[in-house]
Image (tube, grey):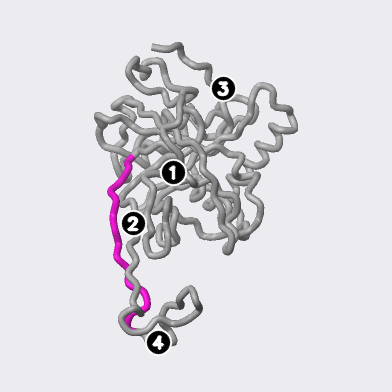
Amino acid sequence: MSDPVLCVPEPGLLLRLAAPLQSWGEHSHFTDRDTASFPTRSGVIGLLAASLGRPRGEPLTDLTRLSLTVRSDRPGIRLRDLHTVGGGLPPKATVTTAEGKKRSGETSTLLSHRYYLADAVFTIALTAPLTAESTEAERADIHGLLKRLECALRSPKWPLYLGRRSCPPEGPLFLARTDDALRHLVRLPLAATAPSTRGIEFIADRPLHTLPVPDELRTADAGDGAHPSGQATDEPVTFHTTRRTYRSRPLYRRSLHLPADQYAGLGIQQLTALARYLSNHLAAPQEGGRS
């Protein structure tokens, strides 16, 4: 077993992404609308932008500074929904083609396959890139951004949804702002009933070997997530309606076998355990110190 990596506390936000349906588009194209198995950077940054009331096409550089770490409490079940578009309408009301014409006859009805994650729950941490060398001005800037996002998520300017407009969140979405977001991400009560043989998966845009894991959860045969497992093309450059652009970024994964007493069950049982943890550990964030 390698020596534990020194973990520096990072300020950030903790969010709970839960809904009957979620859909985090990964390779969606025309009539096929897929979903990733986890919340994407583009989807979460879009949620933040919506909470701020930021128009499409506005810069995203302040939001893309934040790192995203996802804890998959309950991965959900992939569901396919079949939509028909344009059928039974007069020719002038049917779907417009790429050439600007109208479809007619047998081509007037389009079939669209849309995929969702049903009954999934994710807990995420959005953390800021502060180091021991960060200046006071940099720290103040990051804390100011996190404060603005907290206020926006508590009282969003535009409706929030989990990947698609038809997927509004249920239950509490914003959990806390804290100076040690990753430590709490590992310890928050899980929305699951019993430990899985596969453990709980963490997915991030950064190496996960620095995740603040308690010593008793470290095992010699477990991967530490220090190296990327693949790539995801979900780093938003712009959400502009006519030139939406994304970049690829590395994808890191790590599984942990969390304690059995951290599995808080479902529904009101889990929400009660979550509220108790927040009250005991995160009632008042301490800026500049550990909370």
Residue 262 quadrant: top left
Mark linked to residue 16: 1
Per the image, the residue denoted by label 4 is 91
CA gap, disc 1 and disc 3: 23 Å
Per the image, the residue denoted by label 2 is 115
Quadrant that contains the N terminus: top left
The crowding category of the residue bearing disc 3, from other C-alpha atoms within 10 Å (few below 14, some 14 to 19, many at least 20), is some
The crowding category of the residue bearing disc 1, from other C-alpha atoms within 10 Å (few below 14, some 14 to 19, many at least 20), is many
CA gap, disc 4 and disc 3: 62 Å
| Disc 4 element | helix
Nearer to us in this view, 259 or 78: 78
Nearer to us in this view, 97 or 187: 97
CA gap, disc 2 and disc 1: 21 Å
Q: Which mark lies nearer to you, 4 or 3?
A: 4
Amino acid type at circle 2 is: Tyr
Mark linked to residue 8: 3
| Disc 3 element | loop
Q: Where is residue 258 in the image (x, y as percent from the top left)?
A: 34, 26
